[in-house]
């Protein structure tokens, strides 16, 4: 750590390609910068810079050392900014991408969020396709399932369950399935993922995930809201998240079936670019979701 000043002088010299340019950035004399770099080279036992009358350039060793030092100084700067902003008031526009059904669990808690953070302007983009968070310019996204993207940081928000449900009129007409095998005699409403085009698996205890492919299909669509609507209209039995079906079940327009045979639980997470520091507005949003979302799950 006693060489930190020399490292700072070296990095600025490498970026300015001159001791004079580095001295202007650091508020020191060019001679002081040059001596600081020379002491660092003496300590390391290698030459980091090639000097000429007009400019300096990196040696091969200097290039390797510069890349590592630049990363370290960036990390220190980010750590300093994080501490300085820790008590800053969260404010500004916050762009968030989330699936279409996200309004079901997010909108009910938004008034509380707005009350806590009146200076944050939320911009919500509801989209069932998997958007590129970085390319799309989003501050964060809410996603379900596996998170393979290594460029994103993530925090789990909470689990949810899946339910099989149908309208009372449909069940009266076709009968209530009592065991998994009964589904082979029913009209099944299937969800197709917009991004991959794959049909959603129905996870039933003791059956492979592709078992639903062998059940009679009455309708396939790529929108969960439409799937729920089709079930309420009596078109068949649908497989959907419990939070999407909850209101309809409470209202009596849908009935849950085979609950004890369902095996799979889903998981929502909030993600954000790993190369972007957690600003006060983003930290407030992530912490709020962690605290309030699926709290009763």
Image: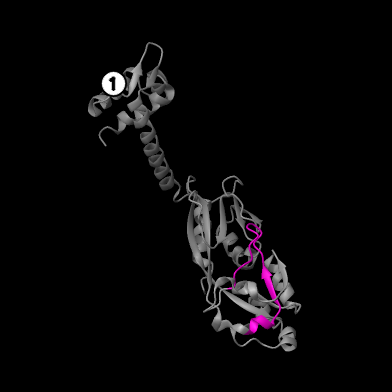
Residue drawn at x 60%, y 46% as measured from the top left: 137
Residue drawn at x 45%, y 47% as measured from the top left: 85
Examine the rendered structure and indicate whether residue 215 appears above or below residue 40: below
Dot 1 crowding, Cα within 10 Å, few <14, some 14–19, many 20+? some
User: Foreground residue, 258 or 82?
Assistant: 258
Residue 249: image quadrant is: bottom right
Q: Secondary structure at mark 1?
A: helix
Prevailing secondary structure class for the magenta stretch in the rendered image:
loop
User: Foreground residue, 36 or 59?
Assistant: 59
Is residue 89 something that shows in the picture? no
Residue 166, position as x, y percentages in the image: 69, 80
Disc 1: which residue: 35
Examine the rendered structure and indicate whether residue 121 appears above or below residue 249: above
Examine the rendered structure and indicate whether residue 19 appears above or below residue 141: above
Q: Is residue 88 left or right of residue 40?
A: right
> What color scheme is it?
one colour
Residue drawn at x 70%, y 68% as measured from the top left: 225
Q: Is 185 a magenta residue?
A: yes
Q: Is 222 a magenta residue?
A: no
Residue 65, position as x, y percentages in the image: 34, 31
Residue 120, position as x, y percentages in the image: 58, 53
Q: Is residue 222 left or right of residue 242?
A: right
Residue 1: image quadrant is: top left
Q: Is residue 84 left or right of residue 50?
A: right
The part of the chain drawn in magenta is 182-202
Residue pushed farthest front?
Answer: 214
């Amino acid at each position: 750590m006693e060489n930190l000043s020399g490292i700072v002088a070296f990095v600025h010299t490498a970026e300015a390609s001159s001791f004079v340019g580095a001295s202007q950035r650091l508020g020191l004399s060019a001679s002081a910068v040059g001596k600081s770099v020379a002491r660092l080279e003496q300590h390391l036992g290698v030459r980091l810079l090639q000097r000429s009358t007009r400019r300096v350039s990196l040696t091969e060793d200097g290039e390797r050392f510069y890349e590592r030092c630049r990363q370290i100084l960036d990390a220190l700067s980010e750590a300093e900014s994080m501490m300085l902003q820790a008590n800053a008031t969260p404010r500004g526009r916050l762009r968030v991408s989330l699936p279409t059904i996200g309004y079901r669990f997010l909108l009910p808690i938004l008034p509380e969020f707005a009350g806590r953070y009146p200076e944050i302007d939320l911009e919500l983009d509801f989209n069932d396709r998997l958007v590129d968070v970085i390319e799309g310019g989003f501050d964060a996204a809410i996603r379900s399932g596996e998170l393979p993207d290594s460029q994103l940081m993530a925090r789990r928000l909470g689990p949810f369950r899946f339910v099989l449900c149908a309208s009372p009129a449909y069940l009266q007409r076709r009968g209530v399935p009592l065991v998994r095998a009964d589904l082979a005699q029913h009209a099944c409403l299937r969800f197709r993922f917009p991004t991959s085009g794959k049909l959603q698996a129905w996870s039933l205890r003791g059956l492979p995930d592709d078992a639903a492919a062998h059940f009679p299909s009455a309708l396939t669509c790529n929108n969960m809201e439409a799937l729920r609507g089709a079930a309420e209209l009596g078109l068949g039995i649908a497989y959907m998240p419990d939070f999407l079906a909850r209101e309809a079940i409470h209202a009596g327009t849908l009935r849950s079936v085979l609950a004890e045979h369902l095996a799979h639980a889903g998981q929502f997470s909030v993600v954000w670019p790993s190369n972007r520091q957690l600003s006060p507005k983003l930290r407030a949003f992530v912490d709020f979701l962690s605290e309030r979302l699926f709290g009763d799950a």
